[in-house]
Image (cartoon, rainbow, N blue to C red):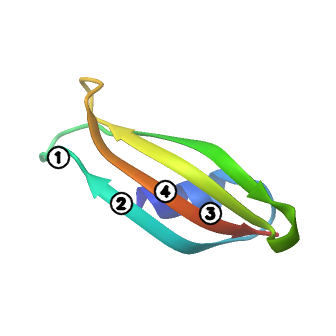
Amino acid sequence: SFLSTLAGVYLPGKKSLIHEVKVKCIKPVYIGDTLSVEGVVDEKHDAFSLLVVKVVMRNQNGIKVCRATMQVGVE
């Protein structure tokens, strides 16, 4: 749900649609953990209105628990 929120709320444009997500879970996440999500646009393809976003999730101790790559179509 964090990845969907990142694409739907924080990416530019009125609408965005996730085309592909590749996720790698690195460490476990436990009940009560506080997660932060950081996304960086890695590629932009104007011809297809497509962004490639690299995402990192960290817990409250700054430990990387997940990383992902998303391809998102934007309007």
**Residue type, numbered disc 2:** Val
- Image quadrant occupied by the N terminus: bottom left
Q: Position of residue 63 (x, y in %)?
A: 25, 29
Mark closest to the chain's N terminus, 4 or 1:
1
* Residue designated by label 1: 29
Q: CA distance from mark 4 to mark 1?
A: 19 Å
Observer-side mark, 4 or 1, equals: 4
Callout 4 touching callout 1 (CB < 8 Å): no
Residue shown at the point (60%, 65%) measured from the top left: 71
- As displayed, is residue 57 above or below residue 3? above
Q: CA distance from mark 3 to mark 1?
A: 23 Å
Q: Quadrant of residue 30?
A: top left
* Residue designated by label 2: 23
Q: CA distance from mark 4 to mark 3?
A: 15 Å
Q: Position of residue 2 (x, y in %)?
A: 43, 56
- Kindly state the secondary structure of the residue where label 2 is placed: strand
- Image quadrant occupied by the C terminus: bottom right
Mark closest to the chain's N terminus, 4 or 2:
2
Image position of 30 (left or right of 58): left
Q: Position of residue 60 (x, y in %)?
A: 27, 28
Q: Which of the labelled discs sits on residue 8, or is there none?
A: 3
Mark closest to the chain's N terminus, 4 or 3:
3
Q: Residues within 10 Å of mark 1 (few under 14, many from 20)?
A: some
